[in-house]
Amino acid sequence: MSGRTRVRACPERTCVGCRKRAAKHELLRVTAVEGVCVPDPRATLPGRGAYLHPDLACLDLAVRRRALPRAFRAHGSLDTDPLREHVAARADSTPAS
């Protein structure tokens, strides 16, 4: 095959919190619905999306840097409480390694 491999390309996205690149399946897609940031784990909600590590540290960074309103091109601030609850619940259910 002369140097060709059959490895499938994995799409990468950038976390809006820490600005690190990661595989799309490792990040949580977030969308803005009527001024509220909502998690979109199945990536099926319409509209513009932003990607975030499912970690409270990255969420705090994104809120502090005002990265979510910028990513959604929204004016003013967005409510992140539903997103924070989802990330916290996911962190509690994931076993620590």
Image: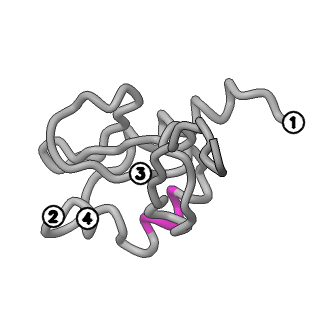
Determine which residue is flagged by label 4. 69
Q: Earlier in the sequence, mark 1 or mark 4?
A: 4
Q: Position of residue 73 (x, y in %)?
A: 17, 66
The extreme right residue here reads 97
Question: In whole angstroms, how far apart are the C-alphas of marks 3 and 1?
Answer: 23 Å
Q: Which residue is mark 1?
A: 97
Q: Are marks 3 and 1 in contact (CB under 8 Å)?
A: no
75 shown above or below 85 = below
Give the Cα distance between marks 3 and 4: 13 Å
Q: Quadrant of residue 91?
A: top right
Tell me where the magenta segment starts and ends, as one range.
59-63
Query: Counting residues from the N terminus, which is met first, the one under dot 2 or under dot 1?
Result: 2
Q: Is residue 85 left or right of residue 95?
A: left
Which part of the image, by quadrant, shows the C terminus? Answer: top right
Give the residue type that dot 3 points to: Tyr
Residue 46 placement, left or right of 3? left
Q: CA distance from mark 1 to mark 4?
A: 33 Å
Q: Which residue is mark 2?
A: 74
- Comparing 79 with 72, the one in front is 72
Looking at the rendered image, the quarter that the N terminus falls into is top right
Residue position marked by numbered label 3 in the rendering: 51
